Image (cartoon, rainbow, N blue to C red):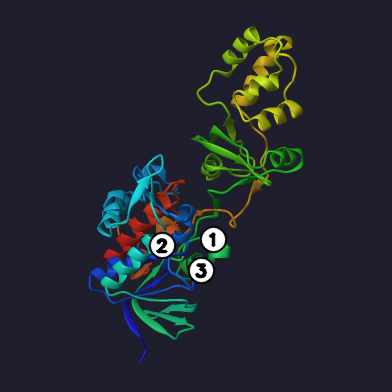
């Protein structure tokens, strides 16, 4: 006899597990499948293994989408405080690292264990690894899998986006969306390092490992965090954040000395230390390796007393608006999330259900809703999974 469930959840990550829990708590017979060998693989890898499970300040205005209002309903119905209450119910110690980012004191495994325990208590069944080869709809959803066929009244797609394919990410959600007539907005890697070439790449390679507090801005969005030089370009929280707003040809403006009137400082140093070389003065403000590299390539390394006001002004501009061309990104391989996805115009913001296909739902990263770094994308996963679980 063909196994039949009320709800089939495809994907046992953050959003899928939350949906399975909520649907199970409503008395629905739930089956969650995933092609991975472990549930919550991205959860386990997040936050350096400690899982940045939410952000105290997560709000709809923080998210990117072609419809900025779509996420309002879900995020207002399942808040960071709701997930924190679940964490505290399971007595998982946590702390705020910075900027509202909440991490486990111990291991991300505690969050996965909490979700699996909640799913078990809700009566949800989780089977993995399980590969789905096809899904059709003929009154109900029929899934062909390598564990045999499964039928369900509702289908929830929680397979994520294209980011980090080495962890099993695929475009399955987008393929399925198109199969059922839903649009998919253009996708691109987000929260991802930027890459350089030529002399700019050589400059970055020489500084690999150097980190600098900065204010990075692109297309109207600004982030005060650290940048990190790498062997391929730049990374670090500031760059990852701004990458979600960057596209080919766009400029990234980086203030390497935020909060400092650099020109006034240079004038004061010129008066106080006229014989000191520029690199010596800059080494008091910035990492020595960076100051030396700048003086070797683009800044006049002479005694401060020999620099004209025009030159001091140019140095100020070079440090307060450091701007070199970026060739691209390190792609989905290094992207923490995927920008774009299943078009929200095809979904109900209340239920996460497809407007033209009753019983079909898309949640989490698969949907065109993307948050910044720092627990925001997990909060979207919890909130969208929760909402779908109320209606699937």
- Pick the front one: 244 or 114: 114
Q: Which residue is mark 3?
A: 172
State the SS at label 1. Answer: loop
Instruction: Give the mark, 2 or 3, whose residue is nearer the N terminus.
Output: 2
In which quadrant is the N terminus drawn? bottom left
Expressed as whole percent of the image width and height from the top left, the position of residue 92 reads: 32, 56
- Pick the front one: 152 or 215: 215
State the SS at label 3. Answer: helix
- Horizontally, residue 345 falls left or right of residue 268, namely left
Q: Which residue is mark 1?
A: 162
Expressed as whole percent of the image width and height from the top left, the position of residue 181 reads: 46, 67
Image quadrant where residue 198 sits: top right
Extreme-front residue of the structure: 106
Residue at image point 50% right, 34% down: 220
Per the model, the C-alpha gap separating discs 2 and 1 is 23 Å
Q: Which residue is mark 2?
A: 109
In which quadrant is the C terminus drawn? bottom left
- Pick the front one: 76 or 224: 224
Q: Residues within 10 Å of mark 1 (few under 14, many from 20)?
A: many
Image quadrant where residue 364 sits: bottom left
Instruction: Give the mark, 2 or 1, whose residue is nearer the N terminus.
Output: 2
- Horizontally, residue 106 falls left or right of residue 89, namely right
Q: Residues within 10 Å of mark 3 (few under 14, many from 20)?
A: some
> Relative to 305, is 194 above or below?
below
Per the model, the C-alpha gap separating discs 3 and 1 is 9 Å
């Amino acid at each position: 006899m063909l196994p039949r469930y009320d709800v089939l959840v495809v994907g046992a990550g953050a959003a899928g597990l939350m949906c399975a829990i909520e649907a199970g708590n409503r008395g629905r017979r739930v089956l969650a499948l995933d092609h991975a060998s472990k549930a919550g693989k991205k959860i386990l890898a997040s936050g350096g293994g400690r899982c940045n499970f939410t952000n105290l300040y997560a709000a709809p205005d923080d998210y990117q989408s072609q419809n900025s209002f779509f996420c309002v309903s879900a995020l207002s119905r399942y808040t960071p405080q709701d997930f924190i209450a679940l964490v505290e119910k399971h007595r998982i110690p946590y702390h705020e690292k910075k900027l509202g980012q909440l991490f486990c004191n111990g291991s991300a495994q505690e969050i996965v264990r909490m979700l699996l325990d909640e799913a078990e208590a809700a009566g949800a069944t989780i089977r993995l690894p399980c590969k789905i080869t096809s899904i059709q709809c003929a009154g109900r959803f029929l899934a062909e899998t390598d564990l045999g066929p499964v039928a369900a009244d509702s289908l929830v797609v929680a397979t994520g986006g294209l980011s980090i394919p080495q962890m099993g990410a695929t475009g399955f959600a987008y393929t399925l969306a198109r199969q059922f007539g839903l649009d998919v907005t253009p996708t691109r890697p987000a929260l991802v390092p930027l890459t350089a070439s030529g002399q700019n790449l050589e400059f970055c390679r020489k500084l690999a490992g150097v980190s600098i507090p900065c204010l990075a801005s692109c297309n109207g969005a600004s982030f005060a965090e650290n940048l990190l030089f790498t062997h391929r370009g730049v990374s670090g929280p500031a760059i990852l954040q701004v990458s979600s707003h960057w596209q080919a040809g766009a400029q990234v403006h980086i203030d390497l000395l935020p909060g400092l009137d650099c020109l006034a400082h240079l004038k004061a140093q010129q008066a106080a230390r006229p014989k000191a070389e520029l690199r010596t003065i800059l080494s008091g403000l910035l990492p020595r390796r960076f100051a030396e590299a700048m003086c070797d390539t683009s800044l006049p390394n002479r005694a401060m007393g020999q620099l004209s006001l025009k030159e001091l002004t140019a140095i100020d501009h070079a440090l307060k608006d450091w701007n070199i061309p970026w060739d691209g990104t390190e792609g989905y391989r290094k992207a923490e999330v995927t920008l774009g996805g299943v078009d929200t115009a095809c979904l109900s913001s209340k239920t996460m259900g497809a407007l033209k296909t009753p019983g079909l739902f898309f949640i989490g990263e698969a949907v065109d809703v993307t948050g910044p770094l720092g627990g925001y994308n997990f909060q979207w996963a919890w909130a969208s999974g929760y909402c779908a679980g109320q209606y699937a």
